[in-house]
Image (cartoon, helix red, strand yellow):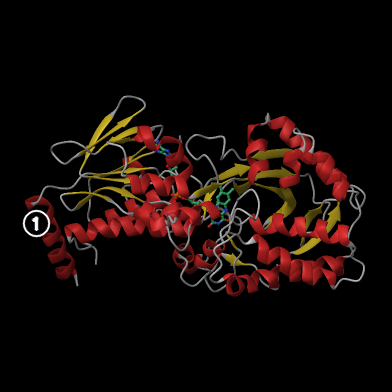
Amino acid sequence: MWWLYAALGFVYLLHFTTAEEPKIVIIGAGASGIAAASKLYEHGFQDVIILEAENRIGGRVYTTWFDESWVDLGGQWVHGETGNAAFKLAAPLELLEASGEKNWVEFDIHNSKGVRLPLDLSQNLMALLTNVSGEANEALAGNNGSIADFFTAKFNIELQKYPTFNETLVKEVLKMFEGLTIATDSSDNWTDISATGYTAYQDYPGSNIVNWKDRGYGTILDVLMKKYPNPEEELPIMNNTLLNSEVVNVNYNATDKKVLIETSNGQKYTADHVIVTPSLGVLKEQYETLFTPQLPESKVKTIKGLSMGSAAKIYLSFEAPWWSSNRDLILLWDEMDRQEYENDTSKKWLLDLIGFFTVAHRPRMLCAWINGAGARYMEALPENQAFNEAFTLLNKFFGNSYNITRPTAYLRTNWSNNKHFRGAYSFRSVESQRSGVWANELAAPLLVDGKPIVMFAGEATNSQRWASVDGAIDTGFREADRLIELYNTKNPSQ
Ligand SMILES: Cc1cc2nc3c(=O)[nH]c(=O)nc-3n(C[C@H](O)[C@H](O)[C@H](O)COP(=O)(O)OP(=O)(O)OC[C@H]3O[C@@H](n4cnc5c(N)ncnc54)[C@H](O)[C@@H]3O)c2cc1C
């Protein structure tokens, strides 16, 4: 077989020595940028560099060492198995563990008066949430509004069946369900989430909560770069990634059909193609200054019309677990308490903290999840204040049932507050629906003489799997494929 490799290598060499080697600049070393680079390198492209604004690779895949464990500040779970690009890469390497009967986690719901709901009732409510979510796709088909009407009506009907529930409790549980439902879209409330978007999202078969055991999602970067499992096969991506290189302008107006890319530290790069991967939040904030000339009207309309959501985490690490390892601690707000917090600007963010979740393979850790507006507010607070308020809340809800110890360490996210992200992940809002824009319009490349010159990747450009790591990877592969097809290259190693 060596002669075949040699022949293909020769064809490839001939191709890139007769035609000039195309220069490709990728903006952003997140999952999509790394995926694009890895596929391009695998197909023989050699002049590929990544310009990354942060001092690390990974973007919203951010696995960091915290109190003797790896934890994920961004993407954490592989959602779905068959069809999921991350699952396909990592499962054969035995890096993943699906949640199943063995490690199934239940709800332990407490209210803001510190009263625990009977555990069987908590499980019933959890089952109800799962069942209604399962029915939503069919029920929402053809609905041009938000998901709120269906969920509110359906939960109202179902909750009436609980004989001990009065009107106030139904309202409180409904609010709890709203918080748990919108976490996947990172919106501020469920009236924002488009029903069409909800049904267009592609769920993959298999477990929806697959974890990375004692590693983190960052391992996917090593797998993509071929550093894992065999470091000797590592693609030259890290050597060609420039950290702390924030791109401030992409000029695609040059007469020689090259793109001129400029960074905030004054460096200039020319390229035949640029792949733009910063988040929708970054594009929303910077599209007017980032591109010369201005982006076409259709692209601007799409950037404005698609929505960027916010979500945040606070990790709390304890000397030893005081909770039950198979129960997530979920918050049910008493209506009077809710009103009090609603009217207090400094406390309002805590209403968006939906629960303190157990973390697989981290027995001493809990992770608070904060939705939407509360996430933005919390991330702007001084760290200590955010930690103290979250801990006070934990005691308020769960202090009567558990001997809560003081955490030995805390860690929180900073997605919305960071100008290189400006949010957690995109979602399809009612506003997106109203403006009639879709992710594929964001994905469309800008052509010069029919050639894709400025290309777009990143989770928000994925029409079926936005808001996910695997969706981001697929878009990186998609743009690499566009260039592979353009240059009609063969993978020399095939
Ligand atoms: C809190 C949270 C939880 C999540 N949980 C999950 C989960 O459990 N499962 C899942 O599948 N997904 C999850 N996601 C979503 C997932 O992490 C993202 O969809 C995915 O990582 C996005 O990858 P990307 O390449 O599109 O963008 P990014 O990761 O944002 O990459 C873009 C890169 O561009 C860089 N950049 C920005 N501006 C510039 C500039 N001007 N110049 C140069 N570089 C620039 C950024 O620093 C970044 O590194 C979560 C995200 C968050 C925030």
Q: Which residue is nearer to you in this view: 386 or 200?
A: 200
Crowd band around label 1 with a 10 angstrom C-alpha radius: few (<14), some (14–19), many (20+) = few
Residue 375, x across and y down, in percent: 65, 42
Residue 160, x across and y down, in percent: 84, 70
Q: Which residue is nearer to you in this view: 180 or 394?
A: 180
Quarter holding the N terminus? bottom left
Residue 109, x across and y down, in percent: 83, 58
116 above or below 29?
A: below
Quarter holding the C terminus? bottom left
Residue 17, x across and y down, in percent: 9, 51
42 left or right, relative to 137: left
Q: Is mark 1 within 8 Å of ligand 1?
A: no
Q: Residue at 27% of width from left, 36% of height from top? A: 293
- Tell me the residue that label 1 is attached to: 14
Q: Which residue is nearer to you in this view: 161 or 434?
A: 434
27 left or right, relative to 447: right
322 left or right, relative to 206: right
| Kind of residue sitting beneath label 1 | Leu
Q: Residue at 19% of width from left, 58% of height from top? A: 486
Q: Residue at 45% of width from left, 40% of height from top? A: 284
Does any portion of residue 196 appear in the rendered image? yes
